[in-house]
Image: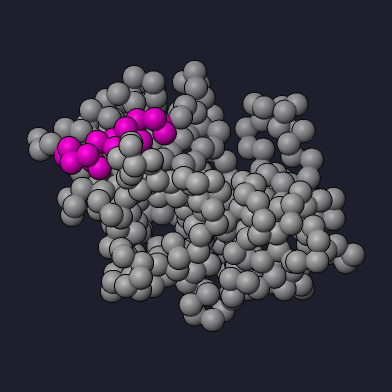
Amino acid sequence: MNDLGSLVQQTADRLAGHQVGAVVAGLARGTVEIRGAGRTGPGPAGGRPGPDTLFEIGSITKVFTSLTLARMTLAGTVALDEPLADLLADALPAGVAVPAKGPRPIALRHLATHVSGLPRLPAGMLLASLLNPAKPDPYAHCTAEWLLGSLGRTSARAVPGRSFRYSNLGAGLLGLALAHRAGLSYGELVRREVCEPLGLADTVLAPDAEQAARLAPGHTAGGRPVPGWDLAALAGAGALKSTAADLAVFLRAQLAAWPEDAGGGGAPLGPEIALTREVRHQVNPFAWMHLGWMGHRLHARQGGHLKIWHNGGTGGYRSFTAFDPEQQVGVVVLANTRRSVDGPGVQLLRGLQAGRG
C-alpha cells in the first residue's frame, strides 16, 4: 500500500472506532485512494462499506445546489442578483411575500452564501426540534405548499448581503426556486446540471432499487438504526445521497478548475466552478463564504494553507469534504453514524497539505 493509501486507511480505521462504518477518500496531486472500515450495519448483512456504498451527505448537498446556480447563471436562465421573489412570483400563496429586512430584496447569491438574513429553519421548526429531538425526519412535512406558506410567518433577521447567518431555510428555498424556474424537480435539475456532466451516476435524490441496496443504513451516536431523511421541498439544503467514489470525482473537478482566474482551465464545468469561487463574502479575517463552499486560511504561523470545505449531517449520517486547490489535495469522509467526522477529515487534509501521502 502506498503512502496515500496508508494515510487514508488509517483515517478510516480510526473512524471505525467511533462509527458503525466509514469510507474515506484522499486525493493528492492526481492520485485518488478510497478505503472503508467498520460495517454498514449489525449482523451478517452488514458488510464493509466501500467506494460505491451510498450515504446521505446532508448539507454537502448545498454545494451541488450552488453549482447548479452557477450553471444556470452562465446559461442566462437566472442571475446571481435576481430577487428570490421573482423566481417564486407565481408559486407564492396569495398575500404571502418573501421576507426581507430593509428595502433590498433577498437575491439568489445571498441564499448561496448564507447572507440572506433568513433564520436557520422554517417558522416553528426550531421549537419543534427542541421539543422532540428524536423525531425520525423533522423535515418530512416541508412540502412546497407548506414551505412557501410559512414565509408569511417568517421574519428576516438581518439586511440581505450584510452578515453571515447559516440558513437551511435559505438553501432549501434556493433549490426550490431554481427547480421552479427550470420546470423540473430538484433531483432532475441537479442530475441535468451537475451529475450528468461530471458522470456522477450515484449522486441522487431518490436511489433506484440497485442503489438502495448499496445504501448504508443510518445510526444514532449509540449505534441504533434510524430511518433516513427526505427533506421534501427543502431538498436543496441536504437531501442528496452519494458515494465516496462520486464525491472524489466531484473534488477532482474542483481541483482541476484552479486557478479560478483562468476561467476554470478547460476542466469539466470549469467556468461554473470558477464562478462559485469568484463570489466571496468575508466572515472574519480568516474565513469566508463562496457560493455553497466555506473557505478558510490558516495563519501564516500555522502554515497558511487554504481549506475550501463543507460538512453535513442527517439523523443517522455525517459527512465532510474539503480540498486545497493550491496544493491539489482533497478529502472525503462519509459515515453512517450520527457522530462528527470533521476532526479526522481535517487531520487527513493537513497531512496531505504537508506532503505526506
Q: Residue at x 38, y 72 (%)?
A: 271
Q: State the residue lying farthest toward the right.
A: 95
Q: Work out which quarter of the rendered image holds the C terminus and state it.
A: top left
- Magenta stretch: residue 181 in it? no
- Magenta-drawn stretch, dominant element (helix, strand or loop): helix
Q: Residue at x 32, y 45 (%)?
A: 305
State the residue in front, 292 or 181.
Answer: 292
Indicate the position of residue 74 as horizontal and vertical percent values. 48, 77
In terms of image quadrants, where is residue 3?
top left
Indicate the position of residue 294 as horizontal and vertical percent values. 48, 49
Residue 43 as seen in the image, left or right of residue 326 = right
Indicate the position of residue 191 as horizontal and vertical percent values. 45, 64
In terms of image quadrants, where is residue 255?
bottom left
Q: Does any portion of residue 216 appear in the rendered image?
A: no
- Magenta stretch: residue 356 in it? yes
Magenta residues, start to end: 341-357
Q: Residue at x 74, y 52 (%)?
A: 158
